[in-house]
Image (cartoon, rainbow, N blue to C red):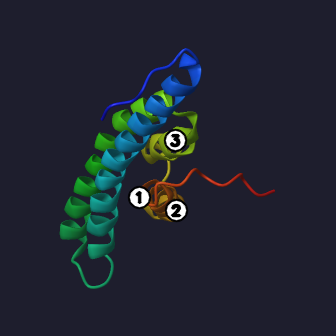
Amino acid sequence: MVCATSLAGGLAITGCAYNNGLALAHRACDHVERSIKLYKSTLGKTPAPDAAQVRARALVQLRDALPIAARAAGDSGEWQALMTTLSESSRVPEYRLIHALSRQCRVAFANEPLPPPTT
C-alpha cells in the first residue's frame, strides 16, 4: 500500500496510519470471527469435555487477535475499543464479549470509522 507524501505531511501520515490500522484491524477480526464461530459451535448438544476443548481453542484465537489489535490501535486510535474488548478476554467469558466484538469487526470490515459512543 502506497501513501502519498506532501508538504502537509501530517495529513498524509494520518492517511497511511489509518490504512495500516484498518488492515491490522481486519487481521485481528479474522481471528475474532474464527473464535466466535468456534464458540458458537459448542452451543447445543456438544458434550461438556468437547465443548471445553473447543472453547479453549476459541480463546486462543482471541488472544492471537489482541497483539494485532493493539498494533491497529497504535496506528489509528479508532481501534482502541477493539483492543480493549479483546483485552477483557482474560477476565470476561467470551459470550459476554461476542456482541461488542461482532459490532467492532463489522465496522472494520465495512471500512467505516466507528460511530461515537451513545450515552
What kind of residue is marked 2? Answer: Arg
Label 2 residue SS: helix
Q: Which residue is mark 3?
A: 79
Q: Residue at x 33, y 43 (%)?
A: 65
Image check: 8 left or right of 53? Answer: right
Q: State yes or no: discs 3 and 2 in contact (Cβ < 8 Å).
A: no
Does 15 appear above or below 35? above
Q: Nearer the viewer, mark 3 or mark 1?
A: 1
Most distant residue in the right direction: 119
Quadrant of the image occupied by residue 45: bottom left
Residue 39 seen by the camera = yes
User: Which residue is at 54% across, 17% downward?
Assistant: 9
Alpha carbon of mark 1 to alpha carbon of mark 2: how far? 10 Å
Closer to the chain start, of discs 3 and 2, is 3
Q: Which residue is mark 1?
A: 109
Of circles 1 and 2, the one toward us is 1
Left or right for 23, reference 16: left
**Disc 3 residue type (three-letter):** Trp
| Residue 42 seen anywhere in this rendered image of the structure | no
Q: CA distance from mark 3 to mark 1?
A: 12 Å
Looking at the picture, how far across and down is residue 12, in whole percent? 50, 26
Snapshot quadrant of residue 64? top left
Q: Residues within 10 Å of mark 3 (few under 14, many from 20)?
A: many
Disc 3 or 1, which lies upstream in sequence? Answer: 3
Residue found 35% across the figure and 36% down from its top: 68
Task: Answer few, some or many: residues within 10 Å of disc 2's Cα (few below 14, many 20 plus, some between 14 and 19).
Answer: few
